[in-house]
Amino acid sequence: MPDAPTNHTVYLTKPMLLGELFTESWRVFAKHWRSITLLTIVVSLPINFLTALATPRTTLPTDDPGAVFEALRSSVNPGMGVTLALLSLVGILIPLGIVAIVRAGEKHEALDVQTALGMAAHRWRAGVITALLLVVFLIGLTILLVIPAIIYGVFWAFAMYAVMHDSLQGKAALAESKRVVRGYWWKVLGNLLAVGIVAGIAGSIVAALFNGLPDGTAEITIQSTISSIASSYTIVAGYLLYRNLKAVHDPSSTPRGN
């Protein structure tokens, strides 16, 4: 028997308060935690393992600044940087898949991980195009001044949700994110920071349980994967905030009582 419809109309007339965002995000995350967690593990575990293997663990000297610089310089491998960049692009499947799971849940449909990954893979190319464009723009803004990069970083914070939810890509996804954030820049910044900090603390506490594993690669992989799972809660929260602000901007286009 499907769950009874949840009343979300309170969030359609005004932006959610931070407490409402935490509460609703936890409700949605708890409802779909198995699918979200499994999807996150399937995607992030191999990425984190390969990243742990590729990351040099160099003991830095503490008495010679020149030696510290030389040790850091020698540990930088261009090939490793390319590998890690490619792995991060694979990680785009996580937010895309989580959006698919949450959207299906709103229709009282259970989306298995395989189907969610398939839907995410279908939009992966659009996500990569959007992510690369976002990075290029932010690097360009950072070269000019740091402040504009921060401002537009918040404006474009919802771009990946626009890729999956609105079937947009590239400049169109960035433009939709900026449109939704406009008028609520400080709210978006504060809410995303608050949710990220709480999720980060929770993830760090759990990850600390695995400190001191005999294999450094295993320790880093497990701790990074735990952090990825904690970050999945922030993805849920960000998506719900995106949906909420879209409804505030376009109340007539949003169905009631989803």
Image (cartoon, rainbow, N blue to C red):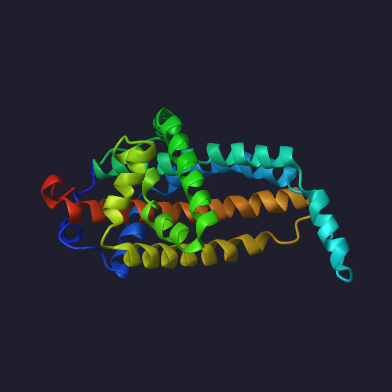
Q: Is 141 placed above or below 125 here? A: below
192 lies left or right of 43: left
Asked whether 146 or 59 is in front, the reply is 146
- Residue 38: x and y in percent read 49, 42
- Residue 61 lies left or right of residue 8; in this view the side is right
Location of residue 11 with respect to 138 vertically, above or below: below
Q: Position of residue 144 (x, y in %)?
A: 51, 56
**Residue drawn at point x = 59 percent, y = 50 percent:** 225
The vertical placement of 199 against 247, above or below, is: below
* Quadrant occupied by the N terminus: top left
Q: Is residue 25 visible?
A: yes
Residue at image position (19%, 52%) is 247
| Numbered disc total | 0
Q: Is residue 36 left or right of residue 63?
A: left
* Outermost residue toward the left in this view: 252
Whether residue 49 is situated above or below residue 190 in the rendered picture:
above
Quick check: can you spot residue 100? no
Q: Residue 117 falls in which quadrant of the image?
A: top left
Horizontal and vertical percent for residue 207?
A: 62, 60
Q: Nearer the viewer, residue 20 or 82?
A: 82
Q: Residue at x 34, y 51 (%)?
A: 239
Residue lying at the far front of the rendered structure = 144
Q: Residue at x 74, y 43 (%)?
A: 53
Give the x, y percent position of residue 146. 51, 61
Q: Give the image quarter of residue 171.
A: top left
Left or right side of 204 for 106: left
Q: Of 144 and 201, which appears nearest the observer?
A: 144
